[in-house]
Amino acid sequence: MSTSPDAPAGLFASLKSAAATALSIGQTRLELLANEFETQKLQVLRILMLAAGLVFAVGLGIVLLVVLLALAAWEQRLFVVGGCAAAVLASAVFLYRALMQAVNRPEPAFAATLAELQEDIRQLKAANSHAKAPD
C-alpha cells in the first residue's frame, strides 16, 4: 500500500513539470513573436522612408526641370541645371526600384514563430504516437 501515497505526489510533480515546460515553451514563443513584431516594424519604417525619399526626389526633379525650361535660353546654365535635374531624377529611379523591391518581396509575417509552432506540434504528435505504441 506504499505505492498509493507516492502516486499522487508523482502525478502532481509530473503535472508541475509539464506546466513548467509549457510555460517555458510559451515564453520562448512570445519572445520570438516580439522579435518578429520588431522586424515587421522596421520593415514598415524602411518602406515609409524610401517612399518619402522618392516623393522628395520626384518633386525636386520636377522643379528643376521647370527651372531648366526657364533657363533654356541662356548659354551654359542649361547644362548645369540639366545635370542637376538628371541626377535628382536618377536618384528617384533608384529609390523607386528599391521601394518596389521592398514592397513586392516582403518577408512572410511571423514565419519563424509559425515554423517553431509547427515543429512543436510535430514533436508532440511524434511523442504521442510513441506513447500509444505497445512496448
Image (spheres, grey):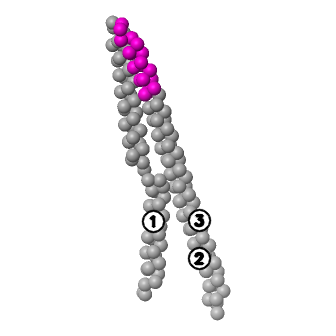
Residue kind at label 2, given as amino acid type: Ser
Mark 1 vs mark 3, foreground winner is: 1
User: Real-space Cα distance between discs 2 and 3?
Assistant: 14 Å
Kind of element beneath mark 2: helix
Q: Are marks 2 and 3 in contact (CB under 8 Å)?
A: no
Q: Residues within 10 Å of mark 1 (few under 14, many from 20)?
A: few
Q: Which residue is labeled 2 in the image?
A: 14
Residue 65 is inside the magenta segment: yes
* Residue 7 on the magenta segment: no
Give the image location of residue 130, x and y in percent.
Answer: 43, 80
Is 135 drawn above or below residue 72 in the view shown? below
Q: Nearer the viewer, residue 118 or 85?
A: 85
Q: Position of residue 95 (x, y in %)?
A: 40, 33
Query: Where is residue 75 drawn, in percent x and y?
Result: 33, 6
Q: Which residue is mark 1?
A: 118
Q: Residue at x 62, y 89 (%)?
A: 3
Please give the range of residues in magenta.
57-74
Residue type at mark 3 is Leu
16 relative to 66 in the view: left or right:
right
- Overall secondary structure of the magenta section: helix
User: Which numbered marker is on residue 23?
Assistant: 3
Question: For the residue marked with disc 1, what is the amino acid?
Answer: Gln
